[in-house]
Amino acid sequence: MNEPASNPPAVGVEVRGLRKSFNGQEVLKGLDFEVKPGEVFVIMGPSGSGKSVLLKHIIGLEKPDAGEILIEGESVASPDVMSRYRMAMVFQSGALFNSLTVGENVGLYLTEHRLNPPDEIARIVSEKLDEVGLKGTEDKMPAELSGGMKKRVAIARALVIEPQLILYDEPTSELDPLSAVVIGEEILKLKRRIQATSLVVSHDRDLAFGVADRIAVINEGRILTVGSPDEVRRHPDPLIQKFLHADFKAHIKSNV
Amino acid sequence: MFENVGEMVVLFWRTLLALPVAWRRRQKVFDQFFEIGNASLLMVCILSFFIGGVIALQTGPVLVERGLASAVGGLVGISMCRELAPVMMSILIAGRIGSAMAAEIGSMRVYQEIDALRTMNINPIYYLVLPRMIAIAIALPLLVVFSILVGWLGGAVVAANNNRIDIGFQAFFVNLREVVQIKDVANGVFKGFCFALVIGVVSCHQGLVTIGGPRGIGRSVTKAVVNSIVLIVILDYILTRLLLK
Ligand SMILES: Nc1ncnc2c1ncn2[C@@H]1O[C@H](COP(=O)(O)OP(=O)(O)OP(=O)(O)O)[C@@H](O)[C@H]1O
Ligand SMILES: [Mg+2]
């Protein structure tokens, strides 16, 4: 892997007093946390707790009602932050460009910002697709892919950016356990290779405890705890314990 | 509809500011341009032929009865140029292309593709709006010229073959050339250009503000077409008034 001569430094993220309501319903009720440069920070929490909304705020797609988000001490709301730092987001839905082929999707960032000549881009694209286990799918259209394949294309599209800050929204939610492990490895590889800061939203307990440097648990728009995987695992809060140890078999047995 | 005019003006302004990067988008402009041509050339042809024909049919017998047979060519010629070609073609294109623009951009909005563009630091105005605006602003005036020519032909064919009018092909065009000046054609082309901008801005704007799922896209498409047509007709009056001097 030939790396760029000087890696851009990893960036830290700080979220301060973040609040957001939609139609009078408060979704984020004052979030405070910090993600250190180069860290893999996993956010867990039940469905509907506001995780996706939080990520959209961090990458500047939503405007907070109150509070602020700082990237290297600069508010994401200021106009040139987005162009100064390389950031990427893997959407929960994938959000592939449906009118472009898989190859064009993955290469779009490079083509649009003219970072490489076309044959070089083609090489990078096929390499990234190979990494996520989708070798030779360049000419397929997104509509021809399965849900899990779309997700992996979306991840490849984000990896191509070589982002300093990458946000994953449920990267493994539609994947079989084997592909999930591959994606977990990719997250760690990116961190090792370019010291990327990663925020991972996931319900996947194996992924979370496998890749996280620190874990935050959020519920109903509030942070319950932030800490190392061990700290979170041993946290006394019954809600966190229930969330981490929910077990299908045990649940069914106790109900029968 | 009018509450969004401010937003549309802003969108138009931003698109103008993006013009310097237009050359980089030439491939997309060409693609859009050919799509417009492909989707509408045949329709333009049929529509224009019959519009020219019906004007001849409506006015011909009346004029001939009053001994004004020689005016038929000029009348068809002028009305095609100044009014019918630009307005009817713009309405056709609003229905055919404006709807497609609103639907495409609207579905990209709903399915978060536009959000994805923004996270990749790609400006949706450069990437989506600019090529469409340029393509339609070039294509519609060309279609207007084409429509004018076909409309004249339609008028001439009807004038020659209807036995209550019965003006020969040659006589029709001799009169037409006496009456129609190049500035009349330019007038129509200019109108077509203005209407193209209206369709582009209204449709792209509607697409970008789409909310909700598939129903939201449907609503946007309808609004884009209806609002474009209403604005075209209003603007047509204003332009006619200004250009009449
Ligand atoms: N654009 C929006 N307009 C209105 N309400 C919204 C919007 N986006 C999110 N919400 C609401 O915010 C809440 C949190 O949504 P969010 O998508 O962040 O949940 P989540 O934690 O990502 O859940 P999941 O794990 O199921 O993806 C939900 O109640 C949702 O209805
Ligand atoms: Mg979510």
Image (spheres, coloured by chain):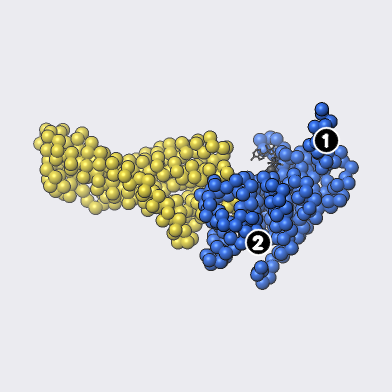
Chain colours: A blue, B yellow
In depth, the one of A42 and A36 nearer the eye is A42
Residue at point 80% right, 32% down? A252
Give percent across and percent down for residue A18.
74, 46
Give whichever of discs 1 and 2 has the lower sequence position.
2
Tell which quarter ligand 2 is in.
top right
From this view, report whether residue A220 is shown above or below residue A170.
above
Q: Is the CB–ligand 2 distance for label 2 below 8 Å?
A: no
Query: Label 2 amino acid?
Result: Glu
The label on residue A162 is: 2
B205 on left or right of B64: right
Is disc 1 surrounded by few (<14), some (14 to 19) or many (20+) residues within 10 Å? few
- Residue A87 sits in quarter: bottom right
How packed is label 2: few (under 14 Cα within 10 Å), some, or many (20 or more)?
Answer: many
Question: What residue is shown at x 20% (from left), y 34% (from top)?
Answer: B58
Q: Nearer the viewer, residue B227 or A153?
A: A153
Quickly name the residue at label 1: A250
Residue positioned 70% across, 57% down in the render: A186
Could you tell me which residue is drawn at 47 percent across and 53 percent down?
Answer: B130
Q: Chain of mark 2?
A: A
Residue B218 in view here: yes
The nearer-to-camera label among 1 and 2 is 1
Q: Nearer the viewer, residue B40 or A157?
A: A157
Looking at this rendering, what residue extends furthest in the top direction? A256
Left or right of A236, for residue A64: left
Contact, mark 1 vs mark 2 (Cβ under 8 Å): no
> On screen, A156 above or below B94?
below
Q: Position of residue B30 (x, y in %)?
A: 41, 56
Residue B28: image location, x then y, percent: 45, 55
Q: How many marks?
A: 2
Point out residue A122 in the picture as x, y percentages from the top left corner.
Answer: 55, 63
